[in-house]
Amino acid sequence: MESIACPVCGFIAETTDAARLRTVWADHLLGGCGDDVAAITTAIESCVEERQELWRSGLTDEVRSLTATIDLLWEALRYARLAEPRPTSTKQSG
């Protein structure tokens, strides 16, 4: 069994097919916690900081997967922002 934890809410996606693991997680993100712009932004910042620390320390093995996670989070953020209600402008006559 392969698993990946959602950096936004901690949900653990599990599947027996490792090739589908990120797809399962992305489906969760876009359909689950992916509507919380602040949480997604915090998760992106955390992943970016972790990736920078890995680069500084020379432990670059996990950089590729963190970059893929950041890319998915940016995509989720884009969708979350599109789903946010737009402010309605009110015209004042005068």
Image (tube, helix red, strand yellow):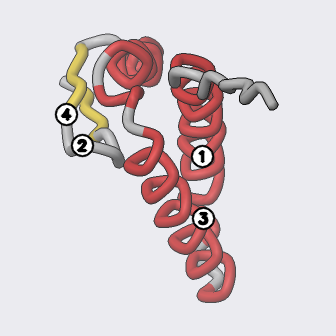
Q: Earlier in the sequence, mark 2 or mark 3?
A: 2
In the drawing, does residue 30 fall left or right of residue 84?
Answer: left
Tell me if mark 2 has few (under 14), some (14-19) or many (20+) residues whose alpha carbon lies within 10 angstroms of its own. some
Taking 36 as reference, is 16 above or below it?
Answer: above
Say which mark, if any, is on residue 12. Answer: 4
Q: How far apart are the alpha carbons under marks 3 and 4?
A: 20 Å
In the drawing, does residue 34 fall left or right of residue 62?
Answer: left
Q: Where residue 34 appears, x then y in whole percent?
A: 40, 28
Q: How far apart are the alpha carbons under marks 4 and 2?
A: 9 Å
Taking 52 as reference, is 64 above or below it?
Answer: above
Which residue is painted at 62% across and 20% down in the image? 82
Amino acid at pointer 3: Val
Assign a secondary structure to mark 4. Answer: strand
The quarter holding residue 22 reads top left
Say which mark, if any, is on residue 48. Answer: 3
- Residue located farthest toward the right when viewing the structure as drawn: 94
Give the label, 2 or 3, closer to the camera.
2
